[in-house]
Every structure is written in structure tokens, then in C-alpha cells.
Image (cartoon, rainbow, N blue to C red):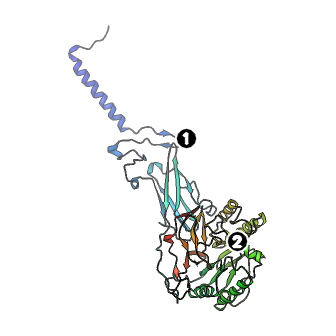
Amino acid sequence: MALTWPSHRAPAALLLLLLLLLLAVSACAAEPAPPIPTTSGRALPRLLHDQATLGRPALEADPSRDPAADPVQISHDPDVLQVYRSTRVSLAVTLPAEHRQARCRWSFADAEAAPPGSADPSRCAVEHTFIGGAADERVSVTISDGAWSKTLTRIIPLERLPVSTRPVEAEAAGNVPEKPRGPNSFRMVVIADTSGADSSRLAALAGRIVAIDADLVVHLGGHARDGEEWNRLRETLVEGLRAAKIPLLSAVSPSDLELGPEVRRPLGKDGEQLDLTDGAHFPDRWSFSYEGVFMAFTSGADQSREALDWLRDRLTEAQVYESRLVFSYLPVHPFGEHVPDGAGSHTLGPKFKVYELLLRARTTALFSAGHHVYFKGRYGALPVVSVGSAGSGGQRLLGSEVAQAPSFTVMDVERGLPQRVFALTSTPATDGTEPFDTILDEAYLPETVEVYTR
């Protein structure tokens, strides 16, 4: 016998059916949903995209919102990188509770220059040492947890220091910053291209170096063009520094080598010869250490594999020092329109091999002089300084219309690490002298010069 609903009971049965359906839906909502399986073997809880409960879908980017509201963030300590000093930075990724087991893979723009083992790329809290302190640094991290992943980028800013633009007093240090004191701290002056300078300019140069209380002077080549100029240089600059007990380190340029350089091995404050870490090829290439800083000097005239191997070996041995400075008359790429004298290339080469060598050796800075202009910046990830010409001005940075006056470069080193680099330039006085009495205002230098960046 077929069963049938009495027609008068149909509305009641329908109401009962609806009531049972509502109860079933409520029971399902009260139970947690099964987890989502992942390829890693862990299970992620299903995330309810209920705006009333969570506010927004978890970990979904919303371009209309403030980025700071994103629960996934990169934090770093300290907040800024020190200028011209290596800075060790602690970095961490802030993760929401549901992704606390996520893995992080870090990417650092200066990875080639960083010390080995600086950061474990699989951890979400790492430490990394940024070398040199010459520019902002970019950090990226990719966070992954099963099927979910996210990539973040953070720029860690370099500390912004005020630029002094006022002239210094000719009679004293004036506005030149006070030099650092204490262990492994000193002031070094780098000069170049004194050839062609008359006795009054050389005397003014020596007097200015003494006035700013330099501890060490490097002549980076371009000493003289003939025997008469050698004599004039010795009688003014060399003797003036010797009388003030300031050691002079003489590097050479390719043209100095052709002429037959009349340079002596470096002397100390009391006239004693200073020990070189390697002086077998002096003066073409040699190395020296001073107050925790290693210095390698090369003319650039010899661009053979042997010379490149020599530089690599010296820098490898120098990893125990706080800083490693390389001085080469020739740069790795031109800075200005001036063509250096002497046979061979006008740049240090092979360019990319030299660059890779210096970067892998964690070179603190490369100083060069061959293009007679002052510029401080980077070639790729390598900090570089082009020192100006102390003997003649009138040269321009590539792409610039402003001719630079004669200048020399000052580096202050504190506890074995460069603290600041600046240039003192000459402005002609009423009596015709040029006393190197003005700090060069770097705000007038271009942001980029060919492949170099400030």
C-alpha cells in the first residue's frame, strides 16, 4: 500500500522539514572544518573569509590599505646604516600565528660583499653585515608555508649626515671635522698629480696638511714630469711633511714608472723605515698596514695575471684587518675626460676580473687618481673614491659642465674603520695663493657619473 500525506497536514510537515534543515546548518557551522593538506606534511587550518569575524581575508594584499597594516613585516635593528662603516643588522619577519612555522629565504643586494655565513637564508630571524656604509641597501625575503608564499622588500637607509659648505680658515683647521682619537684611529690625506705645481702651491699643500693634523699622507701618483719637478717636490712637500713628522707613502702612476720614480720606501715619524707587508715589487706594487688598516698599492701599469694574483693573495691574507683599502692610480672605469699619461690602458684591468676580485675580498674602498676629479660613490657594489688633482684643476666629471679646482682627499679612520671621506679644495686668494681652504660641497656633484653612483 502506498503511503500518502494527508493533504491537511502538508503545511505542518513542511514547517518541520525547514526546522530540521536549519538545525543541521547550525551544527555544521559550529564544528571546525577539516584541515587543508600541504605538500610539507603539515596541515593548515581552513581560514574563514568572514569579514565580520576576521576583518579581511588573512594575508591577502589590499592595495587600498596602509602597507603598515599588513601583519607580515620586515623589522631591522639598527634603523640606519653607519656612513663609511660596516654595520651588522638584525632582521626578522613578523608572522601571524597561523604561519609561525613558515620558512624564509633572504636575498641581499650586497651578497657578494658580505662575510661568509653572514645570514642563514632559511631562518626568519637573521643577522647580516652590510659592508662599506656608502649607500642604502635593499633586502628581500620570500616567506613560504605549504601552498602559501609572500615576498617582501625593505630598503635599509644609510644615515644622512649634514654636508658642510662653509670655507675653513686658512690659518687653522677651521671647519674641518675634528679627527678621531683613540686606538686604531687616525687621519689620512690622499694627494695626487702634483706634477706641474709650482713651489708656492706645493708649500701651501704641505702647510694645509699639517694644519688639519694629518697622521699619514699617501701620494697616489703623478709626482713629477722631470728631474727639476722631483727636486721641487722634495724641497717643499716631502721636506715639509718630514719636518712635521708625518709619514709619506708614495704610490706611483704608469708615467712615474716610465720616468724612473725617485721615491723612497715609506718613513716613520722619526725618519725610520717602516716595515712593508710585501715590498718585493716596490714601487710598482706593494702593501702596508697601519693602525688596523691594510693598504695595497698598485700603479696599474702591469695588468698581467701575475699582478692580479698578487693583489688577490695580499687581500686574502688581509682578512684579519678591520679594513682593506686598495690604492691604484688607474680606476676601473673613467671618471673624467682627462686621459692619464703613460703607456697602456687608461683604466685598471681586466675590468670585470678586478671588480670581482675586489668584491670577493670585501675591499673597504678603492682609491684612484688618474682622471683628476673628486668623486665618492660606488662602482656596482664596490665603494670607490676618485681623489682630485692637487697640482692642477680644470677637469670635469663625465657628463658634468663644472670644472673642479685643485683638491686633495681626507679620510678619517676610527677604530680601524673609515668614518668619513671629504675633499679640501682651493679657491684663489687675493695674493694669488691657493690655500686649500674650502670643504668641497658634494651637493654639487652629480648623482651618477657613467657607471658610478653617489
Q: Secondary structure at mark 1?
A: loop
Q: Classify mark 2: helix, strand or loop.
A: loop
Few, some or many residues within 10 Å of mark 2 (<14, 14–19, 20+)? some
Mark 1 vs mark 2, CA separation in Å: 65 Å
Q: Amino acid at mark 1?
A: Thr
| Residue 119 badge | none
The number of callouts visible is 2
Q: Earlier in the sequence, mark 1 or mark 2?
A: 1
**Residue at the extreme left:** 8
The C terminus, quarter of image: bottom right
Q: Along the line of sight, which residue is nearer the eye, 237 or 17?
A: 237
Image quadrant where residue 121 sits: bottom right
From the top left corner, tell me how far across and down residue 169 is, in percent: 50, 86
The percent position of residue 173, horizontal first and vertical second, equals 52, 86
Q: Is residue 233 visible?
A: yes
Note whether residue 414 is visible.
no
> Is the residue 136 above or below the residue 320 in the image?
above
Work out which residue is located at the far top of the displayed protein and give it: 1
* Residue type (three-letter) at the residue carrying disc 2: Asp
On the image, the x and y values in percent for residue 393 come to 59, 76
Residue corresponding to mark 2: 341
Of residues 279 and 229, the one nearer the viewer is 229
In the rendered view, tell whether residue 69 sits above or below residue 252: above
